[in-house]
Image (tube, helix red, strand yellow):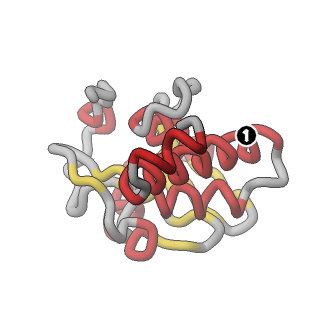
C-alpha cells in the first residue's frame, strides 16, 4: 500500500527512519481512512535536530510531557505517553523512508488513549483485526465455518 508521505517537505535528513503511528498507520493496516495529520515518533537525535530547525514556539507542542514538533501536516513526537522511539519501533515494518508501527504496538498506543471515543473505536478495530488474523492462521476450516468467519 502506498501511503504517499512526502518527508522532503521537512528539509531534514533523518538519522533513523521516523516511526509512523496514528491514522496513517491505521490506514496502512486497512482499518480506517486517515485524518488530516501524519503522526511520527522520532529517535531522540532526530527530534532534537528538527526542534533546532523549527525553533519558533509555534512549531512546538507539549501534551502532558510528550514533546512534539508540528510542521505542515506532520506531528513529530519525541515520545507518546513517555514511551520512546526505541520501545515503540520494536517489530516495526520497514518502508523506504520510514517505519510503520507494528500492529501490536499500535494496539498498545490506542489502549493508552482509549478514554477518548475516537481512540476507543480504533482500539475495537484493532482487536477485530488481530483476532481475524489469529483465527485465520490458527483455526482449521471446520472451526471457521462454525464461527462463520
- Please, is residue 86 above or below residue 72 in the view? below
Q: Position of residue 31 (x, y in %)?
A: 52, 34
Q: Which residue occupies the extreme front position in the image?
A: 142
- Please, is residue 112 above or below residue 58 in the view? below
What residue is shown at x 24% (from left), y 33% (from top)? 8
The one of 136 and 34 positioned closer to us in this rendering = 136
Q: Position of residue 131 (x, y in %)?
A: 54, 52
The one of 124 and 3 positioned closer to us in this rendering = 124
Q: Which residue occupies the extreme left position in the image?
A: 96
What residue is shown at x 26% (from left), y 48% (from top)? 98
Q: Position of residue 52 (x, y in %)?
A: 40, 57
Say which quarter of the image contains residue 25.
Answer: top left
The one of 99 and 18 positioned closer to us in this rendering = 99
**Residue 16 in sight from this viewpoint:** yes
- Residue at image mark 1: 121
**Across the whole image, how many numbered discs are drawn on residues?**
1
**Residue 69 in sight from this viewpoint:** no
What residue is shown at x 51% (from left), y 39% (from top)? 145
Q: Residues within 10 Å of mark 1 (few under 14, many from 20)?
A: few
Q: Position of residue 40 (x, y in %)?
A: 44, 49
Which corner quadrant holds the N terminus? top left
Q: Secondary structure at mark 1?
A: helix
What residue is shown at x 69% (from left), y 45% (from top)? 124
Amino acid at each position: 500500500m502506498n501511503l504517499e508521505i512526502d518527508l522532503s517537505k521537512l528539509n531534514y535528513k533523518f538519522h533513523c527512519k521516523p516511526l509512523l503511528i496514528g491514522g496513517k498507520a491505521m490506514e496502512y493496516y486497512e482499518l480506517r481512512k486517515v485524518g488530516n495529520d501524519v503522526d511520527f515518533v522520532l529517535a531522540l537525535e532526530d527530534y532534537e535536530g528538527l526542534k533546532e530547525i523549527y525553533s519558533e514556539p509555534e512549531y512546538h507542542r507539549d501534551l502532558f510531557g510528550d514533546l512534539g514538533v508540528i510542521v505542515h501536516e506532520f506531528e513529530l513526537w519525541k515520545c507518546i505517553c513517555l514511551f520512546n522511539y526505541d520501545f515503540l519501533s520494536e517489530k516495526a515494518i520497514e518502508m523506504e523512508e520510514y517505519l510503520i508501527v507494528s500492529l501490536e504496538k499500535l494496539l498498545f498506543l490506542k489502549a493508552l488513549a482509549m478514554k477518548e471515543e475516537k481512540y476507543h473505536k480504533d482500539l475495537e478495530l484493532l482487536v477485530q483485526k488481530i483476532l481475524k488474523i489469529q483465527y485465520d492462521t490458527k483455526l482449521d476450516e471446520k472451526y471457521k465455518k462454525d464461527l462463520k468467519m
